[in-house]
Amino acid sequence: MSKSAGCCKRFLHYAFDYETPKTLVIPSLGVGFVFRFTQFLVVMYVVGYVCVVQKAYQDTDTVISTVTTKVKGFAFTNTSDTEPRFWDVADYIIPPQVLKQQHNRFFLQLPSPSTTCVDDCNCVEGRSDPRGNGIQTGLCENYSTTARTCEVLSWCPLEIDTKLPEHALLVAAENFTVLIKNSITYPKFNFHRRNILPHVNSSYLKRCEFSRLTDPHCPIFRLKHIVSEAGEDFQDMAVKGGILGILIDWSCDLDWWAGECLPKYSFRRLDNKHPVNNVAPGYNFRFAKYYKTADGEETRTLIKAYGIRFDVIVFGTAGRFSIVPTIVNLGAALSFLSLVPVVADWFLVTCSRKRDLYSRHKTTHLTEDADSASVSMGTTYGTQ
Ligand SMILES: Nc1ncnc2c1ncn2[C@@H]1O[C@H](COP(=O)(O)OP(=O)(O)OP(=O)(O)O)[C@@H](O)[C@H]1O
């Protein structure tokens, strides 16, 4: 036979020989054990991980929620910067730390490298520097006997906030309480819930306070408790300011055999408190209250507020039994069972004692002119 005819024949065999599985019964305890043990592992994976841990039989939905808060508590302050003052709910929603009466005026800036000048040429009319104090008028005037600065139009007197107070103004705020009203919905399951649970009545709300051990479902939280659960010191945080997260986890199993769907609260500091780099720490912002004096001049009280901002973050995923994910995920997981014979076969032909015998019987090639007793590779056709 020529070389090309041989090649052609091999190709035809390769392409068109039909392979069909035959059953070979191996009376071997070792191989049988490997087979059953691998089957057991696959079944454990399907039941334990896919069904119990992953709950792959469930359809899922993510939470949609809304939050409102109400703070309550009283405080009395008496510092060198401020008059003696009593604070209640209406006063401290944005608690002030620095207060200053200001009027809209032309005035000279405090001397600094960016504000000092020699003559009017150094001051440009209309120029405003975001880090400066106002809009320049173009005049350079004597600030003192030794320094000249550019005149600006601004609110005066200027705010001086070069040093932070040592104690928070509203020290008593740590004992304030906050009521958090949180409503959630899982639209796919038409499931609605509030963190004020169905069994809660108004007299309970008047006296309860959240405690992880004794009252974990009360929606009223003491600020000090929130900060300390987050591992922070209230007074320290209140001076420099910071952001604290109140996390409400609504992850729920909505199947009837699972427990009730309840919120789980946790608290953590969200802004990055760097232990070494102390540049620009905390959180602060400015706002003002405006009014007119008796002679009609507009005046404002400038407030630079430092403090703890509480961010309420709601998250969660709910799952409920559904036939479609059950079939899809169970089918995918059970398809691993088809790999079990591959593992057992591998053990059969590589690790078992009679591996040569098994290897010989594993594959049978029939020759074209085979009758009932003619097989290749030494295996016996039809007589096993
Ligand atoms: N921060 C809070 N600390 C403690 N209890 C609170 C707080 N906020 C609200 N409550 C109490 O929770 C209940 C529900 O408050 P909600 O704001 O819905 O009703 P309200 O009648 O408007 O409350 P209130 O008039 O007392 O502010 C009320 O009994 C209220 O006194």
Image: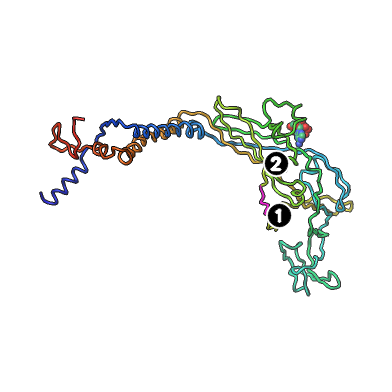
From the viewer's perspective, is the residue at label 2 or at label 1 nearer?
A: 2
Screen quadrant of the C terminus: top left
The quarter holding residue 184 reads: top right
Q: How is the image coloured?
A: rainbow
Where residue 366 appears, as percent x and y from the top left, is 18, 37
User: Which residue has dot 2 on it?
Assistant: 229
**Which percent across, then down, holds residue 338?**
36, 34
Q: Position of residue 2 (x, y in %)?
A: 11, 51
Whether residue 259 is in magenta: the answer is: no
Q: Is residue 341 left or right of residue 318?
A: left
Query: Looking at numbered disc 2 in the image, what kind of residue is underneath it?
Result: Glu
Tell me where residue 334 appears, x and y as whole percent: 40, 33
Badge 2: few (under 14), some or many (20 or more) residues near its Cα, within 10 Å?
some
Residue 103 placement: quadrant: bottom right
Secondary element at tag 1: loop
- 373 vs 248, left or right, is left
Residue shown at 10% from the left, 49% from the top? 1
Ligand 1 is found in which quarter of the picture?
top right
Res 89 → quadrant: top right
Specify few, some or many for label 1: CA neighbours under 10 Å numbering under 14, 14-19, or 20 or more: some
The type of residue carrying mark 1 is Pro
The residue segment tinted magenta is 270-274
Q: Which mark is residue 281?
A: 1
- Outermost front residue: 353
Closer to us: 3 or 72: 3
